Amino acid sequence: MKRVRWGVLGCSGFARRRAIPAMLQAPLVDLVAVASRSLEKAEEYATHFGIPKACGSYQALLEEPGLEAIYIPLPNGLHGEWMIRAAERGIHSLTEKPFTADAHEARRVADAAARCRVQVMEGFMWRLHGQHRRAREAARAGTIGTIRLVRSSFTFQLERKQNIRLSTALAGGSLRDIGCYPVSTARFYFEDEPVRVYAAANIDAEVGVDMRVSGILEFPQGRALVDCGFDLPRRTHLEIVGESGSITVPKPWLPDPEAEIRINDSIERLPEQNQGVEEFEHFSRCVRTGTPCEYGPDDAVRQMKVLDAMLRSIRSGRPEDV
Ligand SMILES: NC(=O)c1ccc[n+]([C@@H]2O[C@H](COP(=O)([O-])OP(=O)(O)OC[C@H]3O[C@@H](n4cnc5c(N)ncnc54)[C@H](OP(=O)(O)O)[C@@H]3O)[C@@H](O)[C@H]2O)c1
């Protein structure tokens, strides 16, 4: 199969550490260009990774002849705008989580993608890792009975310096940045949407973003308890509890190469896998074959509706319908 010609918007720290090394390992990815608001920065990045073309603006990258797909590791508040601009040029987008700033913007992206016949996907690479496929297969097979509770957490200590996560204008805050993981994971295991949510948060007095959030998501079949925060020690945790057993995933979102899950009393080790490579391969294959992505824009709209309802609940102090 012919490789897909990819570009990257922004010289992001995460992309430098994880995403670009994964793209360079993915057989279907041909990484041809990187863009930054500063040409000098783009050139440094391009030289470091051996990327042929450096662009001094994001728009210039979209105008590169033959470009087929972009990866967007920009601040959360810019994902939507650049997915729409790319769609209008017939370019497919894989964007970092969260998909957009809110569900309204997510809907606009989904409509643009449909109108322009391009693929768009929210970059939750964990969903493509075998440990979750195996855990869900075990749950579907009835190993733990009907799922009634999903408990999951994602917290870490954010250094108090300039950071996109501390900006309301860039759609920062702990819920959109990392709370999106427990929320998407609960939706993944219930295979459904919550109907009502309640969330409480600590809002930073200086910068105005939510620093720590606890939430209850009411699904038709059970509940999810989720928490996230920028001001607690590093913790990631996932437990799926059914009527007759439970599954624990100790490293749900950034697993070691050889992941391990516990299904009731037995521990299962999964074969070594790089979920970043899986994600870029999956998206590239969908672009090349025209097969819809496993997690398309409608899924992303539903995810953003849950985050919006939680943010409404934080403001109102009451449960909110999704
Ligand atoms: N999937 C994961 O595990 C994971 C992990 C971490 C982060 N992320 C996501 O990746 C995205 C980037 O996060 P990051 O930690 O890599 O952030 P970062 O290092 O701050 O990178 C963001 C990039 O966006 C560009 N940018 C454009 N407008 C900006 C503005 N007004 N202020 C600051 N930067 C601006 C900058 O690139 P130029 O200056 O080159 O234009 C910057 O390098 C976020 O959406 C985040 O949620 C995902």
Image: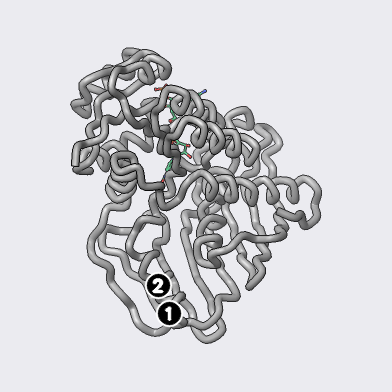
Please tell me which residue lies in front, 221 or 197.
Answer: 221
The residue at 53%/34% (across/down) is: 76
The answer to whether the residues at label 2 and label 1 have Cβ atoms under 8 Å apart is yes
The residue at 31%/34% (across/down) is: 16
Specify the quadrant that holds the N terminus: top left
x and y percentages locating residue 234 in the rendered image: 47, 54
Q: Is residue 313 above or below residue 55?
A: below
Query: Residue 141's mark?
Result: 1
Quick one: label 2, few (<14), some, or many (20+) residues within 10 Å? few
**Residue 9 visible in the snapshot:** yes
Q: Quadrant of residue 199?
A: bottom right
x and y percentages locating residue 246 in the rendered image: 48, 79
Quick one: label 1, few (<14), some, or many (20+) residues within 10 Å? few
Kindly state the secondary structure of the residue where label 1 is placed: loop
Is residue 277 toward the left or the right of residue 94 in the image? left
Q: Is mark 2 within 8 Å of ligand 1?
A: no
Q: Quadrant of residue 61?
A: top left
Please tell me which residue lies in front, 215 or 143.
Answer: 143
Q: Amino acid at mark 1?
A: Ala
Q: Is residue 13 above or below residue 222?
A: above
The residue labelled by disc 2 is 137
